[in-house]
Amino acid sequence: MKAIQIANPGGPESLRLVEIERPIPAPNQVLIEVRAIGVNYVDIYYREGIYPAALPLTPGQEGAGVIVEVGDQVEKFRVGDQVAWCMYLGAYAEYAVVPEYHLVHLPATIDFEQAAAILLQGMTAQYLATSTFSLKPGNTLLLHAAAGGVGLLLTQMAAQAGAHVIGTVSTEEKAELARLAGAQDVILYTHQDFEYEVKRITGGRGVDVVYDSVGKTTFERSLKCLRPRGMLVLFGASSGPVPPVDPIHLSLNGSIFLTRPSLAHYTLTRAELDARSGDVFGRLGSGKLQLRIHQKFPLVDVVRAQEELQARRTTGKILLIP
Ligand code: NDP
């Protein structure tokens, strides 16, 4: 089968197309014929070696397809089932073995491309909006990269919860998409001082919560955008990792809370995975959530797909098709 492998972490050129043996599912695993692969920013951290992994590595943490083989002791899944998964490496390939624990069935209303485009980013937006900070009418939030994959979904969920969304983006085109998704205020943080703008928009009060996945270039000023006892949710590092923080800064900025959540810890049980994925698929199937697939690339064009994402030229989701 064809797969993408990384032998030495580094730039996009370290993504190599190889021909390898089709894997065999171990106990508790299934073999999936992959129909669509979700590209996520986390794939770039793995490619660059920021997240360590055994090499050679087949990257990709999200996909959808049909089960073609089932290992021993698999309980809830059968050959022929249409499924999706996330948070398990090996998606950039024609076939992938995935533990049963990570799988969800596709509802009839959701096709492979939709599933591979929404599962990881949709469940992320869902836990950020409902669990890390439970958004309510009257809340005001600052969301960086509001026109990105997670950004557009979180903007919609936050606006639907009745919260006032202030989004940041790098271009006018992205600003328009963030507004269409429900952001009431949009700041072009590449041209405007977002800390000043947030203070202006909130009449000096600050926001209840900041969702910051940009990291290095935004973190310091994100702290200053919060109201007293507000919460900074640092959930990514698209511009690079944040240096160590002295806890006194949490006090000096208004006894604020800082959390660094991960989807893995918000899908700890089968019940939690089913509830979050069911909520996301339900919102998509009922038309409450709009999904934006920015571009689909053939698997062999993986280098171009990751270059586009890293160069900030994408909005919404990127897919690879085997
Ligand atoms: P996006 O589609 O949001 O792409 C990243 C965006 O970040 C860019 O489009 C860009 O938007 C913005 N950005 C700002 N500075 C930079 C920079 N220097 N280089 C590149 N991009 C930059 O990606 P995803 O939706 O896949 O992921 C968004 C973030 O959420 C990532 O940091 C990811 O790691 C994180 N994440 C965290 C999860 C968790 O559970 N903790 C789960 C899923 C994702 P603009 O041009 O508008 O600035």
Image: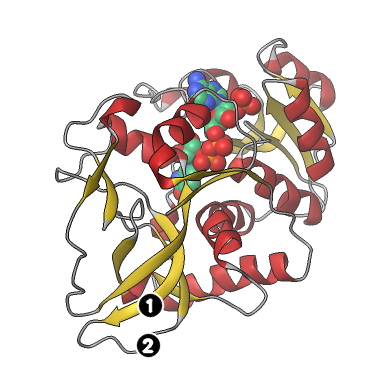
Residue corresponding to mark 2: 78
In the rendered structure, the answer to whether residue 12 lies left or right of residue 127 reads left
Q: Position of residue 229 (x, y in %)?
A: 61, 37
Q: Looking at the image, is mark 2 or mark 1 earlier in the sequence?
A: 1
**Residue at point 20%, 86% (across, down):** 72
Determine whether, in the image, residue 247 is placed left or right of residue 285: left
Q: Is residue 234 above or below residue 80?
A: above
For the C terminus, which image quadrant?
A: bottom left
Relative depth, front residue between 87 and 311 = 311
Query: Could you tell me if residue 206 is visible in this image?
Result: no
Where is mark 1, residue-wise?
A: 67
Image marks 2 and 1: residues in contact by CB distance under 8 Å: yes
- The percent coordinates of residue 144 (x first, y second) are 63, 31
Q: Nearer the viewer, residue 210 or 254?
A: 210
Category of crowding for the residue at label 1, using alpha-carbon neighbours closer than 10 angstroms: few (below 14), some (14–19), many (at least 20): many
Amino acid on which disc 2 is placed = Arg
Residue at screen point 35% across, 55% down: 91
Please indicate, yes or no, whether residue 195 appears anywhere in the rendered image.
Answer: yes
| Quarter of the view holding residue 37 | bottom left
Q: Position of residue 226 (x, y in %)?
A: 65, 30
**14 relative to 3, above or below:** above
Label 2 environment density (alpha carbons within 10 Å; few <14, some 14–19, many ≥20): some
Residue at the spot 63% in from the left edge and 80% down from the top edge: 108
Residue 113 position in % (x across, y down): 57, 60
How far apart are the two marked residues, 2 and 1, measured between alpha carbons? 7 Å
